[in-house]
Image: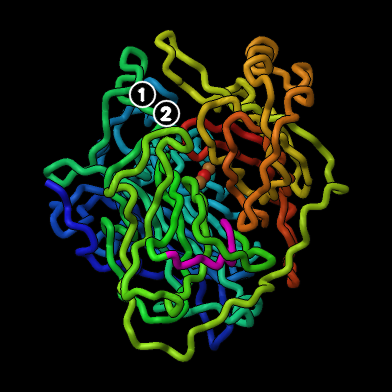
Amino acid sequence: SKLEMFVDELLDMPKILGFDSVYGVPRSKSLEIGMYSKTWKFHRDIPPTPVYAFGVSKEAATIPGPTIMALHGIGTNVTWKNYLPPTHILPWDTSITIAEPADKIGIPTVVHLHGAIGEPESDGNPNSWFTAGFKEKGYAWTKETYRYNNNQQPGNLWYHDHALGLTRLNILAGLAGAYHINHPKLEVPLGLPSGDEFDRTLIVFDRSFCIDGSIYVNSTGDNPSIHPHWRPEYFGDAIIVNGKAWPRMIVQRRMYRFRIINASSARFFRFFFTNGLGFIHVGSDSAYLNEAVTTNGFLLCPSEIADVVVDFSKSKNDSTILANDAPYPYPTGNPVDEANGTIMKFIILTRTENDSGQTPNKLIQYPGPDLSSVTQTRYITMYEYKSATNQPTHLYLNGISFEAPITETPKVGATEVWYVINLTGDNHPLHIHLALFATLDQTELVNETEFSDCMTKINDAIKCQISKYAIGKSIEVPAEEKGWKNVFKMRPGFVTKILVKFSYIHSNESYPFDATAKPGYVYHCHVSIFILFFLL
Ligand code: C2O
């Protein structure tokens, strides 16, 4: 039977301060956040669902987890504690490389703060996983308490599990939450809608459910003779916002700020309002844009974050629906239907508020990408290897899988240009840890098959004369994605040129870079987070 939409109220996840105040002076704070097995109500008519949830206690744990409110320049220590049972609620597949406890008991987890620029020991490397009570540990395990120095620019981050080969299942089970770095001195003067009521975080993902309420995962692998359960992409039928399927929110006729995180495994969202209301973009991923950008809709890939202001006083109707029309997989897959094409409903009160907030055109000014500081150019090629039955099996970067020895060795503080060549049929969100990048251009490949044949043989973009093929049409980077980001959508059949900075971007107020931290970078595609590899 069909589930009724808009019957649950939008939830606001609990907020946890990442700092203490002593006589008004902010101090560093230590938090303990656990991962618990419990049940969660995703919808009025779905029975309680077994999930894994973050929280300060089992009772307080939520889907998604609590929002951590950190303060720029004040460190937050978090001891992430694994209280998960011996076996997983979702089907594992050990035919892919996976974090595996020696005694095969316990669920490996490790938390990555996505968008953080800080010490690599606290980055949540996929091989630094641990099981309940820190009993079993991956070979790259560093320490129990992670340190987030919050010295980067203000913006939106999110934390999620990152255990090797289990990330996809652990996030599907519920292990994700939001993390804000606030910088009142820079942000308050902007006058954006603020406070718990008007500044909201929306964590959006898709899920399917069985009749008994449990999360449905198609557990027949895409190529069962090799991978009994594993499939590279997960798509669900219901759209969940802050832990509720198609919720509703009652809003005043005024401006609201929404920090929207796509926490799906593989689903892209192309958001728009059914009554034509626009979006004023003020930030993208973990950084503010230099200037506000207005759109009528926008594309958000897995792990990407949009920070937008919506002015409900411009609405001619008393309600509107936030909808999605992105095919899945993106861009050439199935068209959306009513269920996965609907996100949530806003019911707009008639009363007009005077204090509606404002969005200045000029936001926070960061220096743009500077090509003269580039010390290294790299070519990164994305391929999908096909099995005998012509099913895509694994995604590789430069023909090398995540387990291979380290290939790229950028230095802390370096600026590099990367040409990312996407030879797969899908759009892949590229994410780089501990860095920010700006996308310079996207150029289509001509005679892609010829180039890709050469790459399959000799795996060297320069010897295969990439410059002879990267001469097709070029596509403008959307204005709302022109700032400093940590995820960008790599179009299939295109070469995307990015400028990567492996350090902080200093804002007006700069903090010293921690020179003692050992460099260690991870970059990967964020669709199901199925293949990664290291930079060190
Ligand atoms: Cu969202 Cu490697 O992470």
Q: Quadrant of residue 431?
A: top right
The image shows residue 133 at horizontal and vertical percentages of: 35, 46
Q: Is residue 381 left or right of residue 164?
A: right
Q: Quadrant of residue 404?
A: top right
Contact between marks 2 and 1 (CB within 8 A): the answer is: yes
- In the image, the segment drawn in magenta is 276-285
Note whether residue 261 is visible: yes
The residue lying at 61 percent from left, 67 percent from top is: 154
Vertical position of residue 302 compared to residue 506: above or below: above
The image shows residue 39 at horizontal and vertical percentages of: 20, 53
The residue lying at 39 percent from left, 35 percent from top is: 166
Residue pointed to by mark 1: 94
**Residue count near mark 2 (Cα–Cα under 10 Å), binned few <14, some 14–19, many ≥20:** some
Residue pointed to by mark 2: 98
Provide the secondary structure element on which disc 2 rests: loop
Note whether residue 81 is visible: no
The residue lying at 16 percent from left, 60 percent from top is: 44
**Residue count near mark 1 (Cα–Cα under 10 Å), binned few <14, some 14–19, many ≥20:** some
Is 279 in the magenta?
yes
Amino acid type at mark 1: Thr
The image shows residue 445 at horizontal and vertical percentages of: 68, 27
The image shows residue 295 at horizontal and vertical percentages of: 55, 61
CA gap, disc 2 to disc 1? 6 Å
Q: Is residue 346 left or right of residue 524?
A: left
Amino acid type at mark 2: Ile
Taking depth in this image into account, of 103 and 166 the one nearest to the observer is 166
Q: Quadrant of residue 55?
A: bottom left
Dominant SS of magenta comes to: strand
